[in-house]
Image (cartoon, grey):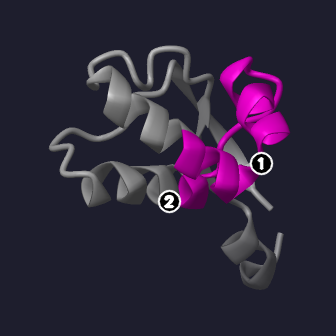
Amino acid sequence: SSAASDVYKRQVLFASGMDHLLDNIPHAMAVTIRKEMYSLMGRNMYYRIRNKERLLHPDEQKQIAAIFSKHGIKFKPAFDKYIEKYDW
């Protein structure tokens, strides 16, 4: 394969599932964060991702992490598992 195509085919960590994403967050704040995630990705997509029907791209993981830190949460979002895949 040529060097040019290798640039696009790097492996990255996609996140799969987020069942416990809001477990360690106070309820009222978790509700707020969930609403922000709905507006970020849409309610439908939120549930597809939560139910492992769609993987979360690293950029989307960063967006969720940004929502966490905006609300003063000191830890990073924890997804159910990570899957190494080629990023197209």
Q: Nearer the viewer, residue 65 or 16?
A: 65
Q: Label 2 near label 1: C-beta < 8 Å?
A: no
Residue at numbered disc 1: 42
Residue 78: x and y, percent? 39, 28
Task: Give the CA separation, mark 1 to mark 2.
Answer: 14 Å
User: Magenta stretch mostly in which secondary structure?
Assistant: helix
Q: Who's the residue at 18% across and 51% down the image?
A: 72
Q: Nearer the viewer, residue 51 or 70?
A: 70
**Residue 49 magenta:** yes
**Residue 56 magenta:** yes
Residue at numbered disc 2: 63
**Where 75 sits versus 25, above or below?**
below
* Kind of residue at disc 2: Gln
43 lies left or right of 57: right
Instruction: Count residues near mark 1 (Cα–Cα under 10 Å), then give few for <14, some for 14-19, many for 20+.
Output: few
Q: Which mark is residue 24?
A: none
- The residue segment tinted magenta is 35-60
Which numbered disc flags the more N-terminal residue, 1 or 2?
1
